[in-house]
Image (spheres, rainbow, N blue to C red):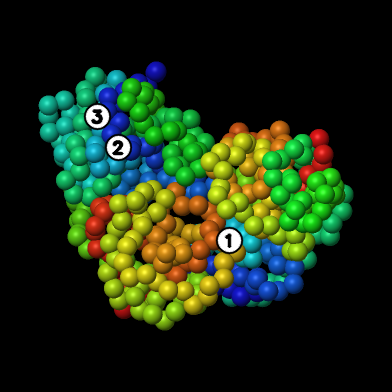
Amino acid sequence: MRNGDLHVLRAGALTTVQDLGRPGYAHLGVPRSGALDPAALRLANRLVGNPEDAAGLEITLTGCALRLSRAATVAVTGADVEVRIGERPGDTGRPLSAPAGAVLRIAPARRGVRSWLAVCGGIDVPPVLGSRATDTLSGLGPPPLRDGDRLPLGTPAGPPPPVDVTVAPAHPDELRLRVRLGPRDDWFTPVALDRLLGTAYTVSPVSNRVGARLAGAPLPRAMARELPSEGIVLGAVQVPADGQPLVFLADHPTTGGYPVIGVVDDVTALAQARPGTTVRFHGPQR
Amino acid sequence: MRIRRVGAYALLLDCGEDEPDVPGRVEAWRAELARRRDRGELDAIEIVPAAATVLLDGVPDPAATARSIAGWTPRPAPVRGTAGVVEVPVTYDGADLPAVAEHWGASVPAVVERLAGTEFRVAFCGFAPGFPYLTGLPAALALPRLPTPRARVPAGSVALAGPYAGIYPTASPGGWLLVGRTGLVLFDVAADPPARLTPGTRVRLAPA
């Protein structure tokens, strides 16, 4: 390995390789995938001098431990986590220098769910359809990390740029998500629209990279017939037969057969929402 | 055709469920939008046809794009013919052939003859990368899915559900009725395009 590698000592609950995904293939049934919070991955990449679209790791809730075979600048963004390089504590949101052979430990998240790790040079697994992202729905891209894996690193582009300060993300107990109604809001009763915009939902534990499942007042339909499959966008709020909304995230299917009552403008806050987090929707006009 | 807004950066062209020849209208719009995008007249990252709609996603200015589309008339989908038809070699030995025959009130050989003699077209892809929804069977022959999906359907399985025929590119759970299998590789990440059967492609399920 000319550029060295990352040796996975502890993979954690779900650690995947992610970049900005593979847009442009939805008509072939290929999900976009990519980091659940692209801005956080871009920031981590900038902090280590990578192009913003370099591949990093998306680490879920329980953390992970990795050994770097070469010296590297690394950065962790996203959830509130303790980072250690060897015995030395490091901060999130800033570049950290790790010597060759150092063990990088990301502890379980204190607040939030997901962290993004960038290593200078990027994770250099072979791209699939222009992306190194793990798509948990279709299985494209590298499988989720397992203990003992070795991930090749790429060539560092140059020294990281000087950075003043990054802002630590907030992890509120209640999310307010802006939603635009449609394309199928006319498939629901007025009561459903009132409930969607007027009552609180909570994030369900069965949420994943495909979607955030919410629990709360069910959204009754005005039309009982089956919706022919239609294209799905990131942030679509789909309402299956049980009336409980599901907000689609990066690994969402390209088509779906349940009506979409509205679309959330920015889903990145859901990437950090733990089960039980309160979610309130509001319309763009409010 | 009605244009519906989808979030901040997408539009849904709704060809209606109850109009005549919905798959033909969807294909006409898909082809028109793809041509316009190739000519630089349409800015969209994704053009995703489906059963009765075409989704445009990654549209920087949906309001302006919706106004442009309102002034466009799609050319009709190409008439059936022999040119450009992909022959998929199918071994008709699916476990659900007798069930299909019963639904259709026909014999198993008549079912095979019907499928082999139909010119299909890829209406859209979905469910899995490279999974084609093939349209071409009359609505009267639409079939229900299995009440309990199979845990594993092998790759290359040719199957029917609703008004569609489909082919499983990879092994997966599935609730469609199995009529046969093909050795044709439907999805290859090293190929360009990676899907063998892309929307608009005409297809024959020829006996192997």
Give the distance between the C-alpha atoms of the residues marked 2 and 1, in whole angstroms.
33 Å
Tell me where residue B22 appears, x and y as whole percent: 70, 67
Instruction: Judge whether residue A163 can be spotted in this image.
Output: no
Tell me where residue A39 appears, x and y as whole percent: 33, 51
Kind of residue sitting beneath label 1: Ser
Task: Kindly indicate whether the residues beneath marks 2 and 3 are on one polypeptide chain.
Answer: yes
Q: Secondary structure at mark 3?
A: strand
Earlier-in-chain disc, 2 versus 3: 2
Kind of residue sitting beneath label 2: Ala
Residue under pointer 3: A65
A158 and B133: which is toward the camera: B133
Q: Which mark is residue A229?
A: 1
Q: Residue at position x 34%, y 46% from top? A: A42
B152 and A14: which is toward the camera: B152
Task: Kindly indicate whether the residues beneath marks 1 and 3 are on one polypeptide chain.
Answer: yes
Q: Secondary structure at mark 2?
A: loop
Instruction: Judge whether residue A60 can be spotted in this image.
Output: yes
Outermost residue on the left side: it is A88
Q: Secondary structure at mark 1?
A: loop
Kind of residue sitting beneath label 3: Ala
Q: Residue at position x 16%, y 25% from top? A: A86
